[in-house]
Image (cartoon, grey):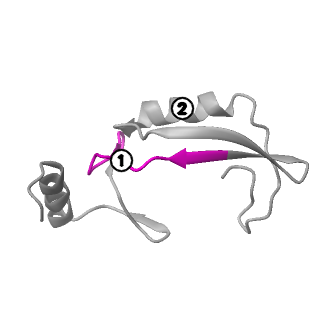
Amino acid sequence: MVGTDDDHRVVGCQSKGLADTVTNILQSHCDPPPSITIEAVPYQDKELFLIRVAQSQNAVHTVKELGPFIRANATNGAPTSRELENLNRHRRGLGT
C-alpha cells in the first residue's frame, strides 16, 4: 500500500496520476505484467493507494532487465537451475 511509512504508519500520498505510473512501470518492466486493481482509499483524512495483485496462472514472471526472482519471506533471490526447472515443469502441467 502506498501511503504508509516503513513503520506502517499512515502518512498519505498524492494519488493523482499514480495509477498510470504504476501500470506503465509494470507493462515496461515485467514479463508478463501482473494483473492488478488499483484503488484510492481514504483513511483518517489521508489518502492511501491500494494495489491488489491477482494470483497469476503463470509459473514464472521476470523483471525484463534482471530475469526471474524467487520471493522468500521479505527477500528476493535468483532462482537456482533446479527451481527454474520445477517452475517450467509446473507451467507445462507436468507437475514436480
Instruction: Return the x and y of residue 60 as percentages of the image width and height.
Output: 28, 49
Front residue of 42 and 65: 42
Q: Residues within 10 Å of mark 1 (few under 14, many from 20)?
A: few
On screen, 35 above or below 91? Answer: above
Q: Earlier in the sequence, mark 2 or mark 1?
A: 2
On screen, 78 above or below 23? Answer: below
User: Is residue 86 inside the magenta stretch?
Assistant: no
The label shown at residue 56 is: 1
Residue at image point 86% right, 48% down: 46
Q: What span is in magenta?
A: 50-66
Q: Which residue is mark 2?
A: 23
Q: CA distance from mark 2 to mark 1?
A: 16 Å
> Mark 1 is on which residue type?
Ser
Q: SS of the residue at dot 1?
A: loop
Instruction: Return the x and y of residue 54 as percentages of the image width and height.
Output: 45, 47
> Mark 2 is on which residue type?
Thr
